Image: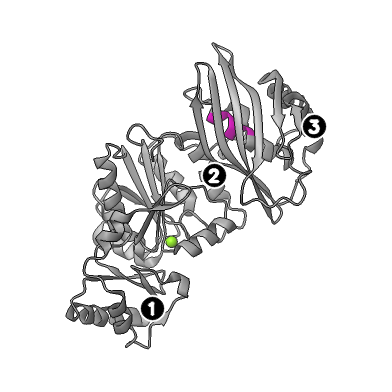
Amino acid sequence: MERLTSPPRLMIVSDLDHTMVDHHDPENLSLLRFNSLWEHAYRHDSLLVFSTGRSPTLYKELRKEKPLLTPDITIMSVGTEITYGNSMVPDHGWVEALNNKWDLGIVKQEASNFPELKLQAETEQRPHKVSFYVEKSKAQEVTKELSQRFLKRGLDVKIIYSGGMDLDILPQGAGKGQALAYLLKKLKTEGKLPVNTLACGDSGNDAELFSIPDVYGVMVSNAQEELLKWHAENAKDNPKVIHAKERCAGGIIQAIGHFKLGPNLSPRDVSDFLEIKAENVNPGHEVVKFFLFYERWRRGEVENSEAYTASLKASVHPGGVFVHPSGTEKSLRDTIDELRKYHGDKQGKKFRVWADQVLATDTTPGTWIVKLDKWEQDGDERRCCTTTVKFTSKEGEGLVWEHVQQTWSKETMVKDDSSWII
Ligand SMILES: [Mg+2]
């Protein structure tokens, strides 16, 4: 969050399973559409927050399976754990707040009186969250009885039933909604209250997100019955909450447009990438566009035309250099020539490219450094290169690529680097 010097333009707070991530879409198309839009138009001045019921262990597993961006803030275990940045630094103030009228031992002891409750995996049991599975038909009764027992023992807890099977017991002050309220308050104290906040969800534990004042909300088209029921009973007349027509991340993009929160055209929805015009010169845009073009080129989804190579060549410096992650140096122009051989080599294959954490800084007037993680999914293999691009711009001439350097990221295991072009 330190990178932001002023209030973020938009803060998106999104659930993951069946909201940001569509588990029925093996191609992850709506997620990839969202990713391009976010990196293209929002990353530099906005905040991305994931708010999930998953524990840190299961959250990290999902990140390995799906092309998720790196959020600025991660809220896990149903709003009981808040962390910041890549290194996921925990918020100790939040931990302190959750200790109020909470006793893990008593919660486990009382819950053990209910044979209907099946304890979830050990990784899902957290300091401020105890999680069970329970059949839909039994959920209401168990919740009622448990609440009474906890009250008698002097605890103030919250019981959330979600996804038609998960029953979570949390401190009263916890939950996705309270975590968001805490975050907004903290950002306000720092002078960084977002101009707009959009909450996105699909199930019961997301309902709280839509109750926070001044927050826009979207229930994705595939939202669960329990959330729609909550909405009908509690928020039907709130024009700030909509039920999207599109599934998952597609619904989030739709809501950005509906509430007029900023650009809502994903570069992935533009067939001719050369036509995308940004409002301001931003080298981050160039990079997102280029890697999207690169994906389409290798998938054979753009025409093998001289116009493209000529346009690319015109945007690189004649003496521009590309440092391949293997350490080999080539001229940028030769790299473009080489690219021609690979047109359509991934046609019909599982091949996707996405940019994460695109951040541009202008070091000296007319010079920009763009840093990003460039990801490539090739069949079942996924690789990432930390990529640095130096651009120069001359008045009226647009941006010129001067230097590109890539190094394998820590989590990438490289067996063979020959198929990595750029
Ligand atoms: Mg969900």
Residue 82 forms part of the magenta stretch: no
Q: What residue type is labelled 2?
A: Arg
Label 2 environment density (alpha carbons within 10 Å; few <14, some 14–19, many ≥20): some
Q: Is residue 348 above or below residue 224?
A: above
Majority SS type along the magenta span: helix
For ligand 1, which image quadrant applies? bottom left
Residue highlighted by disc 2: 33
Which of marks 2 and 1 precedes in the sequence? 2
Q: In this view, does 114 lie above or below 366?
A: below
Q: In this view, does 286 lie above or below 183?
A: above
Task: Give residue 136's mark.
Answer: 1
Residue at image point 42% right, 56% down: 15
Closest to the camera, between mark 1 and mark 3, is: 3
Residue highlighted by disc 3: 338
**Residue 246 % position (x, y):** 47, 51
Q: What residue type is labelled 1?
A: Lys
Is label 3 within 8 A of ligand 1 (CB to nearest ligand atom)? no
Residue 168 figure quarter: bottom left
Callout 2: SS = helix
Residue at image point 35% right, 36% down: 8
